[in-house]
Amino acid sequence: MKKTFLAVSILVLMVTACSNPDQGHVATSIQPQTQIATPAASPTPTILPSPSPLTTASSPAKTPNPAIFEGGKPDHVVIVVEENHSYEKLIGNASAPYINALAGQGAFFTHSYAVAHPSQPNYFVLFSGSDQGVKNDSCGHEFKTANLASELVKAGYSFAGYSEDLPAIGSTVCTNHQYGRKHSPWVSFSNVAKESNQPFNQFPKDFSKLPTVSFVIPNLDNDMHDGTILAADDWLKKHIGPYVTWAQSHNSLLVLTWDEDDNSKDNHIPTIFIGPMVKAAKYDQHITHLNVLRTLEEMYKLPYLGSTNEVPAIQGIWK
């Protein structure tokens, strides 16, 4: 009996234990781990580039450059180049009455300057915007670079240079009587037609037949180089005076200037513009041969030659 009771008791205990798995039982299942919340990292701010002032709505819009040349386009321009006399020696000089009269009739530049010594580099600068590496009056140069004549012709205009004592049309001689090639720069450019190189006796009596732009080069006696101021003044009045009168009613322009001064003061020279499109007055703007050439380029919408892109056209003198 005792053995039977003991066996029954053991059986009851086993059944009870099996019916209650949480009692005396080690769980073998892996419970989910508790997640410990950590503060979220602050997002790194995105740094945007500052807007360009040109793209902000409040920035002023770009405007085109103002017109560089505000004058009209002359039908003809005649450029006369005299020699080796300073502003101080000519202006107010009783031996130059016609020149001083012209100064009172046109735009008279009181601060006009040549760019070099001796003569020839100044002529090359006035004609091509560069001295072409020439620093003296030597003869026999030949260049192929662009110049006033070549660009005028490309644009559909015309050019001629009229030199007193040039022996024949297209001549390339260095000297003849009182002619000096050093004063006629177009002769040294192979891209200028030989027919453009004319003796002064071919200067038209009918000024309507003049090319668009022309140079007039008196000989050494009549340009003040060898001759007197009075002789040059008389020559201008006789040979250029009729054109000046005609130009006033024919939309044409005279430019009178000097290649260089006489080494007396800062290469200071007179320059005068005369024509119906010009307001007669004294002007104190600083100009050189480059500004004169730049003005011609602007008149006829030509490419800028040499260093003319570095200087302004003459402004403020036009009606």
Image (tube, rainbow, N blue to C red):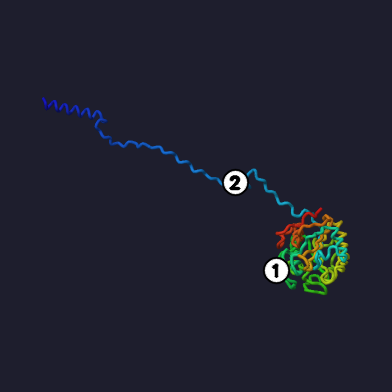
The residue carrying pointer 1 sits among few (fewer than 14), some (14 to 19) or many (20 or more) residues within 10 Å by Cα, namely: few
Q: Residue at x 35, y 37 (%)?
A: 33
Q: Residue 297 occupies which quadrant of the picture?
A: bottom right
Residue 43 in percent (x, y) is at 48, 42
Q: Taking the image as drawn, is residue 76 in sight?
A: no
User: Label 1 sits on what residue type?
Assistant: Gly
- Give the residue pinned by disc 2: 51
Q: Taking the image as drawn, is residue 62 in sight?
A: yes
- Give the residue pinned by disc 1: 133
Tell which circle, 1 or 2, labels the residue nearer the N-terminal end: 2
Q: Is residue 62 above or below residue 261?
A: above
Marks 1 & 2, CB-CB < 8 Å contact: no
Residue 16 in percent (x, y) is at 22, 27
Secondary structure beneath dot 2 equals loop
Secondary structure beneath dot 1 equals loop
Residue placed most toward the observer, 265 or 269: 265
Whole-number angstrom distance, CA of label 1 to CA of label 2: 48 Å
Q: Residue at x 71, y 52 (%)?
A: 65
Q: Residue 132 occupies which quadrant of the picture?
A: bottom right
Residue 158 in percent (x, y) is at 78, 62
